[in-house]
Image: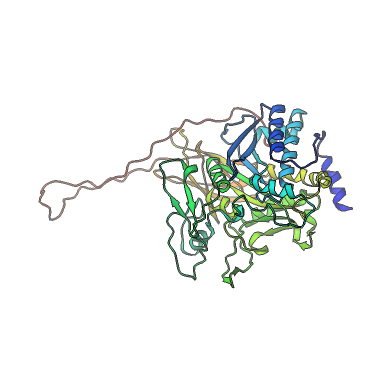
Amino acid sequence: MPHLFSIFLHLLFFKLVAPVTFRHHRYDELVRMLYKVHNECPYITRVYSIGRSVKGRHLYVLEFSDYPGTHEPLEPEVKYVGNMHGNEVLGRELLLQLSEFLCEEFRNGNQRIVRLVEGTRIHIMPSMNPDGYEVAAAQGPDTFGYLVGRNNANGVDLNRNFPDLNTYIYYNEKNGGPNHHLPLPDNWKSQSSENRTLCLFVFIPSLEPFSEHMLFDVSGAAVEPETKAVIQWIRSFNFVLSANLHGGAVVANYPYDKSFEHRVRGFRRTANTPTPDDKLFQKLAKVYSYAHGWMHQGWNCGDYFPDGITNGASWYSLSKGMQDFNYLHTNCFEITLELSCDKFPRQEELQREWLGNREALIQFLEQVHQGIKGMVLDENYNNVANAVISVSGINHDVTSGDHGDYFRLLLPGTYTVTATAPGFDPETLIVTVGPGEPKLVNFQLKRSILQATPKRKAPNSGHRNKVLPKKVQPQAAGKKELKMKQSQRGPA
């Protein structure tokens, strides 16, 4: 069978195969597994929690890096999130297997995995909805409660719980406005029924950090603690690439998830709704699909998706999802991976699923190393944070991080790239991107020269012979000294 032959080929990519345990893991077992991996690979891993669920369970993340807990300039950050819907469990188990695999293969000297870990900061969250999982696991895979455990403990679907920024971007595309890093909705006002805004979010100010802020929709329902924790997480790290693992189909789904079409009888029409990075997203989805054992064949679970990929909104329109929120609020490019027909596959099926997904999980991580990356500095070689990196012809910008480094995923080609920052003159470069490792493109911005302001008399004032200088805004000072990575490792 073709998919079995594909799995066999995937085995050839690895000289050593890490031992894995193919079974389902309840919350306590998941925690023990994460710390087991950390104890086996303490110098390249870190376990941390981004918050707690409704019932107080930690939302744990396992990080892989040669310097755990530290962002190294010019080293991209990538994340996997599993089990957002508590009853869709395969992603959770795959990410635990992946964690074991990365640790074992690094210790065994697998050069592909060594390069990946040393050149990438990888964050793995096996379960975003541990409360829902426990409900689904108590039921088990043999009953007919298809949706039991899908939502969190408050009965909320976490993939319909993020602020809806699509409405903003659809308006801005027609009328002009920001195309990236859209702010969290603040004091939205009700608009006419013709507007596509389905839910009004209000950002409640506080003297405390962001994690203590509350977001409410017009129905009064708070954004859930799991959602708030993830929002804080993705605002705290300069993630470049991400995948969200689901179940119930076998397809790689890419943004936008929310259709631009008008609503009809309470439902939004399905229609292909591409992002400005549509070709790039299609390529990312195809990388996973064709590295997967059988996703690329298209026919799975009674559905057909050419190449095993789909634009989210052309499949069905989804509002307030995490995938679109990543793209519109941060620098992160996220796709959604539907990985199994059965939401809760039997334990004996896990080994086959792991073999079918392992190569795809590794190849997708490697996709973060493409396009361009570099430093944005001022004339004194200080880092310039939050500089905007624009690519002519692609109406979606990214920004530099706190360390002045930026990452822009691009397909091979020649691009006109511009860096801008308040108080600096923009700099534009012509860049040719190849199919291999990312091209290093640094920008050194010069401070804007203030125009001399002519003195003038104030008309009709009682203060004769006095001059009023034009008010000048103070310029922002440079921040940190450049920290460049010293190792001579090759790209992953």
The residue positioned 51% from the left and 36% from the top of the image is 403
The answer to whether one can see residue 417 in this image is yes
381 or 6: nearer the eye?
6
The answer to whether one can see residue 391 in this image is no
Q: Quadrant of the C terminus?
A: top right
Coordinates of residue 145 in the picture (x, y in percent): 73, 57
Q: Residue furthest front?
A: 138
490 or 477: nearer the eye?
477
Q: Residue furthest right?
A: 1
In the rendered view, would you say 473 is above or below 259?
A: above
89 or 321: nearer the eye?
89
The residue positioned 39% from the left and 40% from the top of the image is 447
Q: Residue 476: which quarter of the image?
A: top left
343 or 123: nearer the eye?
343
Q: Residue furthest bottom?
A: 265
How is the structure coloured here? rainbow
Q: Is residue 231 left or right of residue 346?
A: left
Q: Is residue 232 left or right of residue 130?
A: left
In the rendered view, would you say 279 is above or below 108?
A: below
Tell how many labels: 0
Coordinates of residue 478 in the picture (x, y in percent): 41, 35
Coordinates of residue 421 in the picture (x, y in percent): 44, 45
Coordinates of residue 62 in the picture (x, y in percent): 65, 36
